[in-house]
Image (cartoon, grey):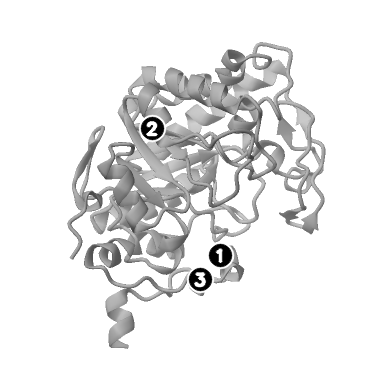
Amino acid sequence: MSTSQLFTPFELGQTTLPNRIVMAPLTRGRAGKERIPNETMAEYYAQRSSAGLIISEATTISEQANGWNESPGIYTDEMTKAWKTITTAVHKNGGRIFLQLWHMGRASHSSFHNGELAVAPSAIKIEEDGIHTPVGKQPHEVPRALETSEIPGIVEDYRRAAERARDAGFDGVEIHAANGYLIDQFLQSKTNQRTDRYGGSVENRYRLLGEVVHAVTSVWPADQVGVRLSPNGVFNDMGSPDYREQFTHAAQQLDRYGLAYLHVLDGLAFGFHELGKPMELSEFRRVFNGALIGNCGYSQEEANERLEAGEADLIAFGRPFISNPDLVERFRNEWPLAETADVSVWYSPTGAAGYTDFPTYREAVTS
C-alpha cells in the first residue's frame, strides 16, 4: 500500500482534504439541452467523492457564456436547485466539491446565441478545426469584440453565479481563466489587441481577471476561491510570446487575495506553444504563497515527485477519473488502472453508458 504524500491530509482554506488528489474539471456534456444538472450527474460525482477535492465540470455563468453542447449552467433557479442535488450526494459520500465558473468567449458559435456572434476581447477567430454546435460541426467564426461598457455586466454575471454556487451548497468556486476561454483570451496578447484599459499591457490584460476575483470574493471568503491558469497551453489556438511575463504578473496579483489555491496546467499533455521554455510550478511557487495545484498528464509517480519537492500541494487528475471512479483507492493500494475510456463516450449524452457504468477495481475483480 502506498504511503506517499498524495495520501496525507491538507488544509485548503476552510476545508480539510483527506488526501491531495484532486479530480480535475471534466466537461462531459450530460446536462441535456436545458443545461440543468440531473440525477445521473449526481451519481457520477458521488462515485468519485473519495478525491480530496472535486472540481466540477466547467459551468456557464450566463446564456452568453454558453458554447458547448449540453454542458451545465448556473444562471437560473432551476439550475441552482439541481446542482444542490449533486452537492448533497457528494457530501453524503464524504466528499468536497468546488464549482468551476466558465465563460467560453470566442470559443463559442452564433448557433448557441440565436445567430448573434460570440464575444471576445478582440475580433480574432480561432484558427483551428471547427466547433461542435447544436446544428452540427461548424467552422469557427470571427467573434464580436466586447464594448468596454459591456464588461462590468460580465463581471456581475460571475458574481451572481458565485452566489448561486453558494446557494447550491458547494464548498467553494474555481474561476476558469485557462484553456483559451474568455478570461484567458483577455490575459493573452495573441487574443487581446484592445486599446482601452483592458488591453495593451500585462497590467491591463490582467484587469478582467482581477475584477472577477474581486467580485467573486465579495460573495465567498477568498480562501474558498481558486483560479485556474494555463500558461503553456495551445488549446483553442492559444499561446503568446510574452506568456511568462503575463502569467507571472497574474500570479503575483492573485497572491494578494489569500485565495484557496492557484490551479496551474503546467503539464504539456494537451500540447505546448513552444514560444520558450515551459513555465514550471517552481516559478509559480516563487510568486504565489498559497496552495498550488499541478495538472495535465501527471502519473502517480510524477505527482509524488512534485509534492515531495515542495513544488505543489495538490495534484489534479482528469482523464484517469473517467474510467476509474475509485482512482484514489487504486493509487493507494497500487491496483492497476482501468483502460482509458474511448473518446467517443466522453461527451456523448447517453445517460449511464460511458459515464457512471465504470466498475471499481473490487467490482471488476469479483465480476
Residue 15 appears at what percent x and percent y?
Answer: 24, 39
| Tag 3 residue | 341
2 and 1 marks in contact (CB < 8 Å):
no
Please name the amino acid that badge 2 sits on: Ser
In what element is the residue under mark 1?
loop
Look at the picture and state if 38 lies above or below 102.
below
Which x, y percent locates residue 159?
48, 27
Gap between marks 3 and 1 measured at Cα: 8 Å
**In this picture, residue 51 sits left or right of residue 70:** left
Q: CA distance from mark 2 to mark 1?
A: 32 Å
Mark 3 residue element: loop
- Nearer mark to the viewer, of 2 and 1: 2
The answer to whether any part of residue 210 appears in the image is yes
Sequence order check, earlier mark of 2 and 1: 2
Residue in the image at 45% along x and 45% along y = 80
Question: Would residue 126 be found to the left or right of residue 29 on screen?
Answer: right
- Measuring from the top left, give residue 364's x and y in whole percent: 33, 81
Q: For label 1, count other residues whose C-alpha is less than 10 Å away and answer few (under 14), some (14-19) or many (20+).
A: many
Residue at the disc numbered 1: 346
Mark 3 touches mark 1? (CB < 8 Å): yes
Q: Secondary structure at mark 2?
A: helix
Q: Amino acid at mark 1?
A: Trp
Residue that carries the numbered disc 2 in the rendered image:
282
